[in-house]
Amino acid sequence: MGTTITFSDDVLRQVDDQQAVTIGETYTMADSGKTILVSGTGGTVTLPAPTAGFKIKFVTSGGLTSANTVIAGGTADVMEGSIIVAGAVVDVDAADNLNFVHTADNVGDFVEITSDGTSYFVFGNALESGGITATG
């Protein structure tokens, strides 16, 4: 969930929670609404089983140095949607994983993931060909 900030003119604004990716982490509903900043050495992180209302965003914030960062779906064949990669729309069809590819990454590449409780719906954008892939 975001953090509510009250400004001196009594305007309330919602600020997204951000955190650096922690390789090996399994995210939970408590992480819903967060933006995860991906950089450095790659590895795998895991989403929970699809849960209605869950949403999370991954953004490349620095170079990936030695391996892909893999977002595992938590359940097989639950990722659906599309990613725009180097201007081409790539179908995400019953995928298990999304991969930020360390040899084709660009700062600002992103994937947004939401769930209805049965599936994960994916939308993303990568500058370079092969920057983000869906597998499984």
Image (tube, helix red, strand yellow):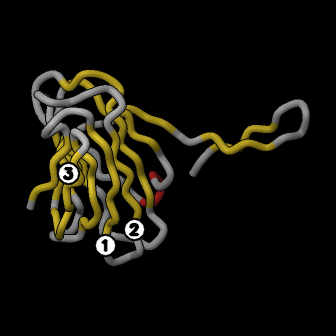
Q: Which residue is mark 3?
A: 98
First in sequence, mark 3 or 2: give its number. 3
Tell me the amino acid under the disc marked 2.
Answer: Ser
Q: Position of residue 22 (x, y in %)?
A: 30, 36
Name the residue at the bottom extreme.
118
Between 99 and 3, the one nearer to me in the picture:
99
Q: Could you say where residue 109 lies in the image, as x and y percent from the top left?
A: 31, 36
Q: Quadrant of the C terminus?
A: bottom left
Foreground pick, 103 / 13: 103
- Residue at the spot x=25%, y=42% of the render? 87
Q: Residues within 10 Å of mark 2 (few under 14, many from 20)?
A: some
Residue 61 x, y percent position in the rendering: 35, 27
In the image, taking residue 130 as reference, residue 80 lies left or right, namely right
Q: Measured from the top left, where is residue 5 in percent x and y?
A: 74, 38
Label 3 is placed on what type of residue? Leu
Residue located 83% across and 33% down the image: 7
Q: Is residue 129 placed above or below 121 in the rendered structure?
A: above
Residue of label 2 = 115
* Residue 119 tag number: 1
Q: Quick one: SS at disc 3? A: strand
